[in-house]
Amino acid sequence: MPKLLWTMTTHCQTLQTAARVELPIFLTIAETQSIYGGKTGWYRKVILQRQIPYFKRGGRVVFSREDLDTYFRSRRVAPRCETAE
């Protein structure tokens, strides 16, 4: 697990990772939870509602790392200090 460093910039907190971790291309729900957080039920709900792209691989649901990054970045809410500029 990478060590996390917090820095304060004009009332905004930015998260910087001290080390890069090489992740597999496809992630299971459990692996996705350990990286992005969230509960199993939430992932199953967004899969059922087809809100998040996924693959079926041997009866298991897996996510593409790129698809997850795109999905979560598209739902980013900018802090007030960024929108005021």
Image: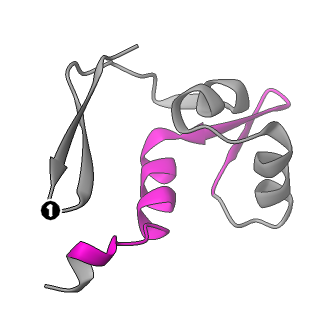
Quadrant of the rendered image containing residue 70: bottom left
The three-letter code of the residue at mark 1 reads: Thr
Residue 82 in the image: state x and y as whole percent.
22, 75
**The stretch drawn in magenta includes residue 56:** yes
Q: Classify residue 27 as left or right of residue 69.
A: right
Q: Residue furthest bottom?
A: 84
Quadrant of the rendered image containing residue 34: top right
Residue 44 vs 83, above or below: the answer is above
Question: Which structural element holds mark 1?
Answer: loop
Which residue is disc 1 drawn over?
A: 10
Task: Compare residues 60 and 46 and report the one nearer the observer.
Answer: 46
Residue in the picture at 30% in, 17% down: 3
**The stretch drawn in magenta includes residue 2:** no
Residue in the picture at 43% in, 66% down: 76
- Quadrant for the N terminus in the image: top left
Q: Residues within 10 Å of mark 1 (few under 14, many from 20)?
A: few
Task: Compare residues 32 and 84 and report the one nearer the observer.
Answer: 84
The residue range painted magenta reads 53-81
Q: Classify residue 82 as left or right of residue 55.
A: left
Q: Residue furthest front?
A: 11
